[in-house]
Image: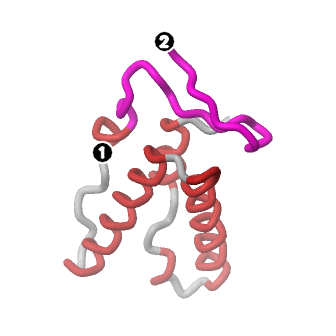
Amino acid sequence: MTTTNEFFNACEAHDWFADFSDDFGKQAKARTEFRRLRGLADDFGGVPAFQAILAAFVLWRDESIANGAATTPPQRANWVPAIPSVETVLHPDQSTIFEQGA
């Protein structure tokens, strides 16, 4: 099951600057992980909260590269409580999206 909070955690933990590593294994791992994140965001016609979070992290990475230094990354408070009482959840078999909460 993947919640908005878990998806944010995965984006936060992702190595957004692995392309600058001399370690090709690290680069390959980061590309594979990014494809997984993008797949979660795009599954089933798209999970809007996941797509917005992923877009924010990609923008942060691009701005950091353009500025030559890492800027402040996306903040959890801006994304995770997007729908305060409802959490977007992917069923473990990822064949169903359902809303959970009050």
- For image coordinates 62% across by 60% down, the residue present is 39
Q: Would you identify the image quadrant in which residue 62 lies?
A: bottom left
Q: Nearer the viewer, residue 23 or 13?
A: 13
- For image coordinates 25% across by 72% down, the residue present is 63
| Residue 87 image position (x, y, % from top left) | 50, 28
| Residue 76 image position (x, y, % from top left) | 35, 40
Amino acid beneath label 2:
Ala
Q: Which mark is residue 75?
A: 1
Q: Is residue 80 left or right of residue 98?
A: left
Q: Which mark is residue 18?
A: none
The residue tagged 2 is 102
Amino acid beneath label 1:
Gln
State whether residue 91 is above or below residue 61.
above
Q: Secondary structure at mark 2?
A: loop
Magenta stretch in the rendered image? 80-102
- Direction right: furthest residue: 93
Q: Is residue 64 left or right of residue 25?
A: left
Q: Secondary structure at mark 1?
A: loop
